[in-house]
Every structure is written in structure tokens, then in C-alpha cells.
Image (spheres, rainbow, N blue to C red):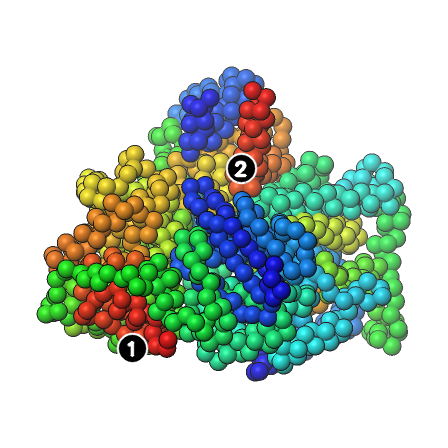
């Protein structure tokens, strides 16, 4: 019993357990879930699908983890920022006012960097409001949650802008000659870059210190405001990156649909990853496992006939369950019940 | 119960897991008196008050109140309020966004016949109540428009309006300036003259002698004595609070070094911080150990926080090694070679979820900057070195800090600052909560560091400790530095200095 | 004793709001006079179009006063409209029982959210976000198509939707065809204004209302003064969802349809209206009159954009977000100065 308790207390227990559950359900329902085949030189299979389509959520989860850890708040603008970044890139590539093109006006790399930079700008805006003006994170990010999508629509002159230029599709689909979907590479790259930055600099420790006890961190010499700002900046850059992948998938900028509801998935990934939504210590690996678990859940629900519009019901219930179990009130109530049971059993004995 | 006694508390005992908070304590409050309750850290002042007002349930003992049958046992503040005991805390427990009138009457507002709140009547009643205390303010304004002093009056008015016979004021003057304190005292005297018994919890010596009739001193959870103000000289009061028998003071001279010839390291000129420390001058030389003494709340911590930059100084200037310092945040001080161990280790020191190693290297890392990480091997080395030197009891250097005992947590935070090899090390109560053996080690360590050229500012509630290590003492009282002693450092002289003038 | 003038920062915020509304509306009247902006009907249309938002904004104000937030309102409205459309249209339920069902659902929704927030101390944002996605998903579960409510399906509901309550004729104008256009309002406007009056009375004259302000001002103090903080929060969220249901009915009377995409971003409008109306995000300050003006400003922006005809509707969103940003920063600045003075 004690060993079981030890295992469940590990931070990675929750995400791995949930992932295991989802995979189990799929296995029981349809063993071909795990099948991988190669058609036309590219990999196919449900597992590949999950890894592929979960890329955006995983990238978002990386940034969201830092925001939650440092400020105990959430950035709900990430979905809208994805859309804005996509619109910005497509506008720059196609030229303003043009809604379909097969040639690009600026080099592809400039276009993509522009999108990522837009994301970073949004992140900086959020960071300034939260870190400098001390506005609650939910409220501060609420502004871009509404405005970003609308601004993106303006960039694209209220139309869906198509980029029918072949190399643009590489980012979200396949590089020529490579069987593995590119988004998987992009995700791995983002994870490696961020992890390197966190570990090779002291930022990882700083973020946790500020999140756990920002007063003590300040006395120890840390610049709490700057660290908070940087986390939101990174989150914005991640959102921009995710927007690039999403846009490249469908080789257009569909302002209304790109990134729709992705903020819930990102937050859910962080919570599922065993990270406390109250800030402090964080585990990036947990968030990433959580992200793919959610994608697996979405895929499973789709396979069971639950549409993308209906899936949020299940996700909402999961988020509430996790948050309730994590809440101190619930934990102390549970503790009291256990103490009562212990006392009763001692009396009986 | 004697005729003029209002509340008697006898033999009160209260324990928490691992600590005896109250040990057969007692308290007597008479009608129409202002009674000071004094004691240092851990004396049990707030615990005994909480036992009286129902916040805590005492383990044993008797509480009697005039006019109430039997042994009183309050289980909540409402219970206490019902028998006429009201409390006003240091943090004004009112709602700043509501009007004065509303704060006075919330929960028991006058109603119209239709059952709705009658604002006109409430405002009228409120005006009457405030006028009764001789405070004419516009009761329809929101509370936050008024100064803290007025807000406290409103809190007192609310308590008093509900027919209280005993009023407990918990450190009410900490955030007030002299004029506001006068107003508060006027109200207190008015209530006393009406027969209300007031318990005045405070550590401001001058105020006690100005407005109180009697004093009860507590120490380490036990009752030390009850005295009338008129008959107790200040020095005896200080001695009682610090647990020294005045007549029994051995002249414990310190055998240490005089290092009055070293070069000057730090000079503070007229620095101050609004509300916490009045303008002060301070100087320390290389290799010197200076103690800062005074009662709790006299401004010791506030002065060093100002020196370090944890609270930005709002006047004057600070010079280190001849160069003027512009301190905007603690990191500036750290870069100039200062280190500061705060007295509230939980709020200002411990980063609970981080490991012992991470806590130890944190300030050092902050000084080096985010991009120059200390290599893991070096971190391990530093952590192990201090775990060994300070005898920190921990399963491993990777254990989370919150799992260590309080004393060991303290040692880790000390290690954090030692790791930065500062030129000036400020230690605010470094030995609080630490066992005797380690206390001595720390004192030895301070002397060793001073011998190696480090300057140390040392704050402790234990005068003996400071006498053994310091060559000079700054004396604080009531929020300002009142003097220095650099020769004839004895317990007797120190306590006289703390107690101040008047007999 | 020195007391500050009656004009403190909170009153200042509301004054800025009211002035902003008058200025905006005046600009509209000047610039678009030719397009009929200056008619009384345009002003009344503000109320007709936004009757639902007024109800929801009142509920949002109550919740924000406690220091919380409720972002599930838009999705709850969508769910209500879908239930009305599907229930009355497809299932053939009679009008009144369906409406009662909607109100009951609103109460239960608020009960669950209020319990999680008030008693389990879960962050309001996360709780109501889960509520938002739950309701939006349930809307799709009920039906994924867009449904409309026609006269045949429910004559009573249809009649309410199209009823006109006329105002005195002298307020009208004669159009270029010689016909007298008397201004009118619809029943939803009466409902919305009634809601404002009732909530105003509740917030100012009942113990529950004052408890909401106290809890938002300082929770610890409120507890020490003997108020039941948990219960106050619970009822605040029940009230919000209940008013949201009423707002949903008004909204449905306007759109006469139900779809999965309905009322997207509505919560933003409600929050923006409250904040622009002077409700502090930190809680404890605000009132429904200010929120009413906030809704008016929101409506005016939308009307200005549509009257222009050439501007994309996105501009309305951006303008609202910009105003919200402006007021949030303004509140933060005022709070900074207040702290400094203390």
C-alpha cells in the first residue's frame, strides 16, 4: 500500500496514467489503432496521427507551462494569437489584399519569422500587463483573446488567404522525401530549444523560485518582474510557432478557425501533466505527455462519433475532476475522512 | 472575583504539536482600566488573547467574567462578542470599499418596514456613534478615503457600539504617526472613563508609560508579573521582558577584539523608510561585528532592510568603500557585496519546493546572472560544503527544503548567504529556532568571519549572544535609532539604553 | 478631520464612462445624421438589440463584485437558444414550460459553478471556463444544425418576438414617403430594464447585496464581521447564471434561432460592459447602472460600425477590446495612486 502511495505521488504519474488509460481504451476497441504503414513514401496510422496533430497543442503546452508556473495564471489568448500569426504571415507572403497566390512576395523564411515575431509581440503585451501593471493574468490575456482574431481578420481583409506555394506546405505536412510528418520535427525542435534555454541558463530555477515564493526570490536577488515577463514572451512565441504549423497544414489563413479552442487544450495539457495550476515547480515532460494524451482523447472521441464541437464536454469534465482533486480543500476533506476512518478502526480494534 | 475585576484568566495552558504556547498563564483585567500586555517573541501574548476571544480553545484553566456565570468557554468571535468582549486587530478588519456607516453596521443594518436596508437611518446612527467618540467625519464616504488612524477608530467604534465591556487592541499603534496616536489615546481614555476594560497589546515602551494603568509581562508562555505603571521603572520592565533579574546581572563582558581601526566599509547617512524607520545614521568598518538591539518592533529589522535595499530608502544616501550606492533592488546590494538573512524565514527566505542545493546556490547564481550558470558539479560541491560546515540535517542535497525542520531550514538560508562570500553580512535573528549547540557554532562562525575581514551586522533577541560577538551595539526604540554603545558593553548598560529615560 | 472630496476615483470612473457614451453617441448623430442616426428609434434599437446583453451584464457585475468572473455566459446562452429552438421547434414543446426549463437549468448551472468556486475554492476562471466548454459542447450534442423558430412551431413565442410597444408619437418622425414612424420597443426591453431595477435594489438594499460588496472588498474582513462568504459567492454565481438564462431568452427572442456558433464572444461583451461601466476587476466596486452604460457604449460602437457600412465588423471587436484595455489600465493606474496615498 505504501509503495502504491509512493508511486501515485510522483509528478509524472497522472499524465502517464491518463495516457495509458486512453491507449488501453483504444486497444480494446480497435487493435488496429497501433498499426503503422507506409503509403506513398509517408507514414500512416492512428499513432502517427496523434503525434502529428498533437504538435500544436504540445508547442502551446510548453509556453503555457511556464506561464502557469511563474504566475499561477493562464494565458487564454494563445488560440487567437495562433490565428493572428497565421494571418500576418499569409498577408506578408501574399501581399495585402490578395487572397490567393501561388508565388510569394517575400522569402518564405521572412514570412514565417514574421508570424513567430507577431506571436512574440502578443506575448510581450501580455507580459507587460501582468508583470509591470500587476493585472490578473486571465483578465490581461482576455484582451488579446478577443482582439487578436479580429486583427488577423483585418490583415487578411476579411477573407481566407490561400498560399498555394508548395514549400509553404512543408511545415505542416511533409518535407519532400521524408516519411515523418514535419510538425513532429518542429515540436521536437521547440522542446529542445526551450529545454536547453531553461537548463543551460538559470531561468528554469528562477521561474520556479518566483512561482513558489516571489518575495523570497526578490530578496535573494532575482528580478521577479523580468522573469514573469519572459515567460509570457516565450508563451507568445510558442503560440506564433504553433500558428505557423496550423496554417501550413491547410496552406491558408483561416482566421475564424485556426487555433479555435486550443487554449483549453493547452491548459488541460498543463494540468494533466501533473503541474499545479497554482504555480511553482513544473515538469515540462508531464505537460508534453499531457498534450499528446489530450490529442489521443480527441482522436478517440472522434472515432467514437463525438464531433469536434461536442468533444469539449468531455474535456470540461476532465479539467474539473483534475482541479477538484488538486484543490487543498478537497485534500484536507479527504485527509479528515481518512483520519476518522483510522480513529474508528482503532476504536473497533 | 474582586469587585473591580472584569475578567480573570487563571492557569491557562495551551499546547500545539511540539510546542507549549501557554504554561499556566494568567491575566486580570479590571473595569475602567487600560492594561498593557507585553512580551517578546513567543511570549504567548496573542495566544492568550485568542484563547479569550474564542479563536483558540484552551486546554485547561479558568476564565471568569463579571456578570457571567461560571467558567467561560468561547468558541468563536461571535460568542465573545455576545458576552461583551471585542477585539480590534492590527490589520484593520473592515472593508475598504464600503462606507464608514456600512462598516459600522454591516450584518445588523436597520431595516425599513418593507425589509430593505434603511440607509438614512443607518447614516444617522453612524453619525451618532462617531460623534460619541468625538470624531466628526462624513460617514457616507467610503472607508478607504480615510487614513489608517481613522479606519482604526471606525473598527473600535464598531466593536464598542455592540455593548462591549472589554476591548482588546492588538498592536493598534504600529502604523500610526504621533498625532494619530494621540487621537487614539483620547478615545481609549474616554472609553476607560466609561468603565470599559481595555487590553492594550503593544511593544512601544513610551506609549505604555503614557496611557496605561497596569502592565502584564509574559515570557515563553508563562506569566512573569503584573505591575502598576506608576511603580515600575522602565529598566525593570525591560529586564522582566528579557527574562533577566535586574539585581542579578553579572557583568558579562565580551572578550572580543576591538577592530575600531579598520577601514570604513559602509556609511549610511540619513536613510529612512516611511512608516517603518525614522532617519538614521550608521557606519561599519571592515571586520567589525555590530549588534542592533532593542525590543521586538523597535525598528531593528526595518533598519537593516533599509540598509540592504529590501525596502527602498526614501531619503539620505549610502556609501560603500567610498562609492555612493544606488540601490534599486536587492540584486544591486548583492552585487556590491552585501548579504541579508531575513528574520521571517518562511515568507522571505524559504523557497519550499526547491531542493536544499538549489536554495543554497540561489543568491550566488543571481549575482552571476542568468546566463552564467554554476556548473552542476560545482553546485554539488558548494552544497555539500555547507551541509557539512553547518551540520545541516537532510537526507540528501536534493531533498525539498520544506521537508526539513525549521532550524535546518534556517541553516540552509544562512548557507545561501555565506556562499556569496559577502563583504557585509546582515543576520537578522539567525539563531531563532535553533538548538543550543548550533547557536554557539553560529556565534563562533561570526567571529571567525569577522576575523577574516567580513563585516557583520547581528540582530538577536538574546543580548548575551550579541555581547559575546559584537564590539559595538546600536540601540533601537519605538521605530528609531536612539543611540550606540561601544564601550562598557554589559547587559546592564544595554538594557538601560533600551529602556531609555524616565524612571 | 480632512475628508476627500466626493469625487473619488470610483465615481471618476463612472463619470468617464457616461461622458464617453454621450460623446460617442453625439459623434454618431453628427457624422451619420443623413443615415438616420439621430432618430429616437436608433437609440431605442440599442436597447432592443442588446436586451440580452443587459441582463447578462447585470449578472456578470454581481459576480465580478465578489472578485470573481464568469466566462460561461456566452455558451450558456447558446445552449439556451438551442434548447428553445430544438424543444419548441423539433420536439413541439409548449412555450412556457420550455422557458421554465431554461430558468431551472440556469439555476443548476450556477449552483454547480458556485459550489466549486465558493466551497471548494477553485479559481473562478478555470471553473467557468470548464462551464463554458461544457455548455458549448452540450449545444452541439443537442443538435449540430442551425435551427430556427417559426410562427407555426410556436405562435406565442413568435408573437412576443415581434410585439411592438409604441411610444408617444411626437418622439417619432415623418419619413420621406410621408408615413409617420412612431418609435417602439419590444417586450425584451421591458424585461431587461426590470432586471436592472431589481438587481439595483438587491445590490443596494438587501443584506445579500451588501455581502457581495463586502466579500469583494476584503474577504477576511467579511468573514470576521460575521458574513457567510461561501454562501454569498454561491448565490452570486447562481444569480449570474439565472440572469444569463433570462438574457438567453431575450437573445433568442431577437434571433429566433439556435446554432452552435451563437453568442460566441458574448462573455467578452458582458465583461467589457461591466469593466467599462466602472466595475473593478479586483471586486468590491461597481454597480449595474454603470454596466448599463457599458452595454450602451458597446452597442453604440457596433451601430457606428454597421452604419458606416464600409468598415469590417472586426473593427467593432477591436474597438471594444481597445476600450477594455484602456479601462483596465486606468483602473490599475488609479489603484496605484490610491496605494501611494495610503
* Mark 1 Cα shell of 10 Å, populated few (<14), some (14-19), many (≥20): some
Residue that extends furthest to the front in the rendered view of this protein: B2
Residue A54, percent from left and from top: 46, 35
* Mark 2 Cα shell of 10 Å, populated few (<14), some (14-19), many (≥20): few
Residue that extends furthest to the bottom in the rendered view of this protein: C2
Image position of C52 (left or right of B3): right
Residue at 72% across, 58% down: C208
Viewer-proximal residue, C150 or B272?
B272
- Residue B270, disc: 1
Parent chain of label 1:
B
Circles 2 and 1: CB distance less than 8 Å?
A: no
Viewer-proximal residue, B397 or C199?
B397
Q: CA distance from mark 2 to mark 1?
A: 51 Å
Q: Which numbered disc, 2 or 1, marks the residue closer to the eye?
A: 1
Residue at 26% across, 49% down: B439
Parent chain of label 2:
A
Q: Assign the N terminus of chain C to one quadrant of the image.
A: bottom right
A237 lies above or below A38: below
Residue A313, percent from left and from top: 62, 37
Image position of B291 (left or right of A262): left
Residue B487, percent from left and from top: 18, 70
Q: Quadrant of residue C149?
A: top right
Residue at 56% across, 63% down: B29
Viewer-proximal residue, B97 or B85?
B85
B43 lies above or below A18: below
- Residue A331, disc: 2
Which secondary structure, mark 1? Answer: strand
Which secondary structure, mark 2? Answer: helix
Amino acid at each position: 500500500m505504501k509503495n502504491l502511495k509512493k508511486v501515485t505521488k510522483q509528478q509524472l504519474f497522472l499524465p502517464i496514467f491518463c495516457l495509458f488509460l486512453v491507449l488501453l481504451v483504444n486497444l480494446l476497441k480497435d487493435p488496429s489503432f497501433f498499426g503503422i504503414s507506409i503509403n506513398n513514401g509517408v507514414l500512416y496510422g492512428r499513432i502517427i496521427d496523434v503525434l502529428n496533430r498533437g504538435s500544436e497543442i504540445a508547442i502551446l503546452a510548453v509556453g503555457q507551462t511556464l506561464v502557469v508556473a511563474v504566475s499561477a495564471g493562464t494565458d487564454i489568448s494563445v488560440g487567437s494569437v495562433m490565428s493572428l500569426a497565421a494571418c500576418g504571415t499569409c498577408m506578408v507572403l501574399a501581399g495585402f489584399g490578395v487572397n490567393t497566390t501561388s508565388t510569394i512576395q517575400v522569402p518564405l523564411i521572412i514570412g514565417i519569422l514574421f508570424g513567430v515575431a507577431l506571436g512574440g509581440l502578443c506575448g510581450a503585451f501580455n507580459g507587460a500587463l501582468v508583470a509591470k501593471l500587476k493585472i490578473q493574468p486571465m483578465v490581461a490575456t482576455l484582451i488579446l483573446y478577443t482582439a487578436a482574431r479580429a486583427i488577423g481578420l483585418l490583415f487578411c481583409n476579411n477573407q481566407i488567404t490561400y498560399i498555394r506555394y508548395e514549400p509553404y506546405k512543408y511545415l505542416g505536412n511533409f518535407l519532400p522525401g521524408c516519411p515523418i510528418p514535419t510538425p513532429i520535427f518542429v515540436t521536437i525542435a521547440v522542446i529542445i530549444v526551450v529545454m536547453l534555454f531553461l537548463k543551460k541558463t538559470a531561468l528554469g530555477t528562477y521561474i520556479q523560485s518566483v512561482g513558489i515564493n516571489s518575495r523570497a526570490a526578490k530578496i535573494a536577488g532575482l528580478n521577479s518582474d523580468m522573469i514573469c515577463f519572459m515567460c509570457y514572451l516565450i508563451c507568445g512565441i510558442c503560440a506564433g510557432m504553433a500558428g505557423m504549423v496550423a496554417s501550413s497544414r491547410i496552406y491558408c489563413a483561416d482566421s475564424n478557425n485556426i487555433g479555435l479552442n486550443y487554449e483549453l487544450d493547452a491548459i488541460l495539457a498543463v494540468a494533466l501533466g501533473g503541474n499545479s495550476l497554482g504555480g511553482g515547480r513544473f515538469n515540462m515532460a508531464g505537460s508534453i505527455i499531457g498534450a499528446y494524451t489530450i490529442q489521443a482523447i480527441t482522436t478517440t472521441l472522434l472515432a467514437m462519433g463525438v464531433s469536434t464541437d461536442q468533444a469539449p464536454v468531455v474535456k470540461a469534465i476532465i479539467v474539473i475532476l483534475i482541479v477538484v482533486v488538486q484543490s487543498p480543500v478537497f485534500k484536507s476533506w479527504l485527509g479528515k475522512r481518512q483520519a476518522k476512518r483510522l480513529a474508528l478502526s482503532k476504536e473497533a480494534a | 472575583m474582586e469587585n473591580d475585576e472584569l475578567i480573570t484568566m487563571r492557569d491557562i495552558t495551551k499546547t500545539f504539536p511540539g510546542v507549549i504556547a501557554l504554561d499556566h498563564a494568567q491575566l486580570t483585567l479590571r473595569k475602567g482600566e487600560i492594561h498593557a500586555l507585553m512580551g517578546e517573541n513567543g511570549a504567548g501574548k496573542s495566544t492568550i488573547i485568542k484563547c479569550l476571544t474564542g479563536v483558540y480553545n484552551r486546554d485547561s484553566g479558568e476564565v471568569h467574567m463579571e456578570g457571567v456565570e461560571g467558567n467561560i468557554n468561547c468558541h468563536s468571535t461571535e460568542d465573545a462578542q455576545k458576552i461583551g468582549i471585542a477585539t480590534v486587530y492590527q490589520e484593520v478588519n473592515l472593508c475598504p470599499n464600503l462606507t464608514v456607516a456600512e462598516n459600522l453596521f454591516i450584518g445588523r443594518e436597520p431595516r425599513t418596514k418593507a425589509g430593505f436596508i434603511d440607509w438614512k437611518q443607518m447614516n444617522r446612527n453612524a453619525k451618532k456613534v462617531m460623534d460619541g467618540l468625538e470624531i466628526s467625519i462624513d460617514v457616507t464616504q467610503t472607508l478607504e478615503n480615510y487614513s489608517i488612524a481613522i479606519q482604526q477608530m471606525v473598527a473600535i467604534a464598531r466593536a464598542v457600539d455592540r455593548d462591549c465591556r472589554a476591548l482588546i487592541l492588538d498592536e493598534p499603534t504600529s502604523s500610526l504617526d504621533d498625532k494619530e496616536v494621540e487621537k487614539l489615546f483620547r478615545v481609549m481614555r474616554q472609553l476607560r472613563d466609561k468603565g470599559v476594560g481595555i487590553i492594550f497589546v503593544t511593544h512601544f515602551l513610551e506609549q505604555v508609560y503614557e496611557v496605561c494603568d497596569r502592565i502584564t509581562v509574559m515570557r515563553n508562555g508563562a506569566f512573569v508579573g503584573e505591575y502598576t505603571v506608576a511603580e515600575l521603572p522602565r529598566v525593570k520592565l525591560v529586564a522582566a521582558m528579557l527574562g533577566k533579574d535586574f539585581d542579578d546581572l553579572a557583568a558579562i563582558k565580551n572578550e572580543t577584539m576591538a577592530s575600531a581601526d579598520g577601514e570604513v566599509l559602509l556609511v549610511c547617512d540619513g536613510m529612512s523608510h516611511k512608516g517603518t524607520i525614522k532617519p538614521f545614521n550608521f557606519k561599519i568598518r571592515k571586520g567589525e561585528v555590530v549588534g542592533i538591539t532593542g525590543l521586538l518592533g523597535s525598528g531593528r529589522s526595518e533598519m537593516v532592510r533599509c540598509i540592504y535595499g529590501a525596502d527602498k530608502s526614501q531619503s539620505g544616501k549610502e556609501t560603500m568603500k567610498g562609492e555612493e550606492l544606488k540601490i534599486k533592488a536587492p540584486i544591486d546590494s548583492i552585487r556590491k557585496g552585501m548579504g541579508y538573512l531575513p528574520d521571517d524565514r518562511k515568507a522571505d527566505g524559504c523557497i519550499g519546493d526547491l531542493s536544499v542545493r538549489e536554495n543554497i546556490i540561489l543568491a550566488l547564481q543571481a549575482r552571476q546572472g542568468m546566463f552564467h550558470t554554476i556548473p552542476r558539479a560545482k553546485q554539488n560541491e558548494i552544497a555539500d560544503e555547507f551541509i557539512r560546515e553547518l551540520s545541516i540535517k537532510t537526507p540528501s542535497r536534493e531533498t525539498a527544503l520544506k521537508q526539513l525542520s525549521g532550524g535546518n531550514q534556517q541553516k540552509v538560508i544562512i548557507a545561501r548567504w555565506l556562499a556569496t562570500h559577502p563583504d557585509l553580512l546582515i543576520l537578522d535573528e539567525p539563531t531563532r529556532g535553533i538548538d543550543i549547540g548550533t547557536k554557539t557554532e553560529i556565534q563562533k562562525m561570526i567571529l571567525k568571519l569577522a576575523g577574516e575581514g567580513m563585516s557583520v551586522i547581528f540582530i538577536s533577541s538574546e543580548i548575551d549572544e550579541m555581547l559575546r560577538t559584537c564590539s559595538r551595539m546600536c540601540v533601537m526604540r519605538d521605530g528609531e535609532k536612539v543611540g550606540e554603545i561601544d564601550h562598557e558593553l554589559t547587559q546592564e548598560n544595554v538594557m538601560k539604553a533600551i529602556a531609555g529615560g524616565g524612571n | 478631520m480632512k475628508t476627500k472630496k466626493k469625487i473619488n476615483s470610483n465615481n471618476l470612473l463612472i463619470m468617464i464612462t457616461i461622458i464617453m457614451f454621450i460623446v460617442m453617441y453625439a459623434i454618431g448623430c453628427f457624422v451619420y445624421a443623413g443615415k438616420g442616426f439621430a432618430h429616437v428609434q436608433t437609440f431605442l434599437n440599442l436597447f432592443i438589440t442588446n436586451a440580452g446583453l443587459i441582463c447578462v451584464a447585470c449578472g456578470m457585475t454581481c459576480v465580478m463584485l465578489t472578485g470573481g468572473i464568469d466566462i460561461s455566459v456566452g455558451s450558456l446562452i447558446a445552449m439556451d437558444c438551442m434548447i428553445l429552438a430544438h424543444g419548441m421547434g423539433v420536439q413541439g414543446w409548449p412555450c412556457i414550460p420550455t422557458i421554465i426549463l431554461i430558468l431551472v437549468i440556469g439555476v443548476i448551472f450556477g449552483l454547480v459553478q458556485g459550489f466549486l468556486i465558493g466551497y471548494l475554492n477553485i479559481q473562478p476562471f478555470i471553473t467557468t471556463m470548464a462551464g463554458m466548454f461544457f455548455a458549448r459542447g452540450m449545444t452541439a450534442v443537442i443538435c449540430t444544425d442551425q435551427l430556427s423558430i417559426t410562427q407555426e412551431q410556436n405562435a406565442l413565442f413568435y408573437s412576443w418576438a415581434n410585439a411592438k410597444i409604441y411610444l408617444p408619437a411626437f418622439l417619432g418622425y415623418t419619413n420621406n414617403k410621408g408615413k409617420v414612424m412612431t418609435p417602439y420597443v419590444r417586450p425584451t426591453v421591458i424585461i431587461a430594464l426590470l432586471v436592472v431595477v431589481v438587481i439595483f435594489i438587491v445590490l443596494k438594499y438587501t443584506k445579500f447585496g451588501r455581502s457581495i460588496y463586502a466579500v469583494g472588498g476584503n474577504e477576511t474582513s467579511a468573514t470576521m464581521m460575521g458574513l457567510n462568504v461561501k454562501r454569498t459567492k454561491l448565490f452570486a454565481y447562481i444569480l449570474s447564471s439565472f440572469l444569463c438564462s433570462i438574457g438567453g431568452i431575450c437573445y433568442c427572442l431577437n434571433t429566433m434561432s439556435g446554432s452552435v456558433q451563437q453568442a460566441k464572444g458574448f462573455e467578452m461583451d458582458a465583461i467589457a460592459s461591466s469593466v467599462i461601466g466602472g466595475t473593478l476587476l479586483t471586486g468590491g466596486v461597481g454597480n449595474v447602472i454603470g454596466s448599463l452604460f457599458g452595454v450602451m457604449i458597446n452597442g453604440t460602437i457596433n451601430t457606428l460600425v454597421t452604419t458606416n457600412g464600409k468598415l469590417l465588423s472586426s473593427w467593432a471587436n477591436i474597438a471594444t477590446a481597445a476600450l477594455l484595455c484602456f479601462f483596465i489600465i486606468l483602473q490599475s493606474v488609479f489603484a496605484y495612486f490610491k496605494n501611494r496615498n495610503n
